[in-house]
Image (cartoon, grey):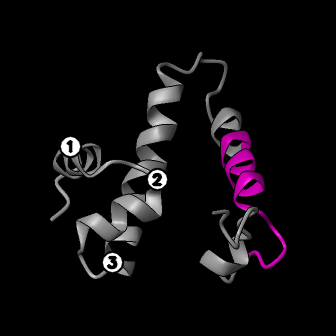
């Protein structure tokens, strides 16, 4: 079964940028991040970006699913054990 939404538009998530995709929003955020480094090299950027995106994703999906971990895991395409581990990692109740 395929998802009805294949390319998330930021306007669905945030009304400020109505024509910007989630991917474009991330790219813009990274451009801003790099411009503020003032010549310094970024450190552990992959982990930083994943943590910045993963926690609000998990919180939003859990809220959407009414706290039901089984439904949230299915929505995310994760098994429930993996979801529980991530919820504990980010201290999401």
- Total of numbered circles in the picture? 3
Secondary element under disc 1, as helix, strand or loop, is: helix
> Magenta region: which residues?
17-31
Which residue carries the number 1 mark?
85
- Frontmost of labels 2 and 3 is 2
Q: Residue furthest front?
A: 1
- Point 66% across, 80% down: residue: 12
- Point 65% across, 26% down: residue: 38
Residue 82 versus residue 87: which sits nearer the camera?
A: 82
Using the image, tell me which numbered label, if any, was put on residue 63: 3
- Image coordinates of residue 76 in percent, x first then y, are 45, 57
Graded by Cα atoms within 10 Å as few (under 14), some (14 to 19) or many (20 or more), the crowding at tag 1 reads few
Q: Quick check: 79 above or below 59?
A: above
- Frontmost of labels 1 and 2 is 2
Which residue carries the number 2 mark?
77
The answer to whether residue 37 is left or right of residue 85 is right
Residue 81 versus residue 34: which sits nearer the camera?
A: 81
Is residue 74 found inside the magenta-colored segment of the image? no
Q: Are the two marked residues, 1 and 2, in contact with CB atoms closer than 8 angstroms?
A: no
The answer to whether residue 36 is left or right of residue 69 is right
Q: Earlier in the sequence, mark 1 or mark 2?
A: 2
- Image coordinates of residue 20 in percent, x first then y, are 80, 67
CA separation in Å, label 3 and label 1:
17 Å
Q: Earlier in the sequence, mark 3 or mark 1?
A: 3
Secondary element under disc 2, as helix, strand or loop, is: loop
Graded by Cα atoms within 10 Å as few (under 14), some (14 to 19) or many (20 or more), the crowding at tag 2 reads few
Q: Quick check: 48 above or below 28?
A: above
- Point 44% across, 29% down: residue: 47
Q: Quick check: 60 above or below 44?
A: below
């Amino acid at each position: 079964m395929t998802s009805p939404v294949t390319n998330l538009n930021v306007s669905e998530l945030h009304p400020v940028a109505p024509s910007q995709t989630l991917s474009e929003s991330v790219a813009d955020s990274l451009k801003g991040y790099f411009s503020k480094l003032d010549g310094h090299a970024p450190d552990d950027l992959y982990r930083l970006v994943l943590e910045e995106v993963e926690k609000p994703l998990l919180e939003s999906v859990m809220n959407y699913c009414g706290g039901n971990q089984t439904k949230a895991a299915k929505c995310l395409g994760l098994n429930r054990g993996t979801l529980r581990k991530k919820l504990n990692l980010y201290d999401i109740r």
